[in-house]
Amino acid sequence: MSKKIKILIADAHPLMRKGIRAALEDETDIELITEADNGETAFDQLKKDAYDIALVDIEMPKLGGIGLSQKITA
């Protein structure tokens, strides 16, 4: 049995998050999909739990995707 993928979706638009979640949640190799509506919330969630993939929107309130990516890699 292979390890399941843990994903964080960070996007300011609820409809976009819902669409991405719907596209991914039937995949058998995905364990967890967590959502955040801004970059700060996403960063806080990333500190609490380990994720394999973070799908981030470039333009989000409080902290955009580029700034979030920079904080993650710092």
Image: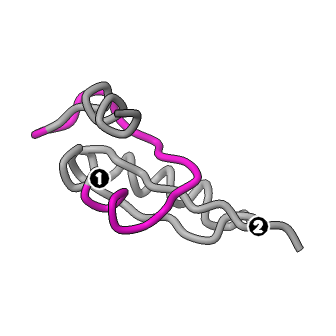
- Percent of width and height locating residue 42: 29, 52
The residue lying at 89 percent from left, 74 percent from top is 1
Q: Is residue 50 magenta?
A: yes
SS assignment at label 2: loop
**Magenta part of the chain:** 44-62
- Percent of width and height locating residue 19: 47, 52
- Amino acid marked by disc 2: Lys
Quarter holding residue 61:
top left
- Which residue position holds label 2? 3
SS assignment at label 1: helix
- Percent of width and height locating residue 30: 67, 64
Disc 2 residue crowd, few under 14, some 14–19, many 20+, Cα 10 Å:
few
In front of the other: 22 or 36: 36
The residue lying at 10 percent from left, 40 percent from top is 62
Q: Is residue 5 left or right of residue 7?
A: right
- Which residue position holds label 1? 42
- Amino acid marked by disc 1: Ala
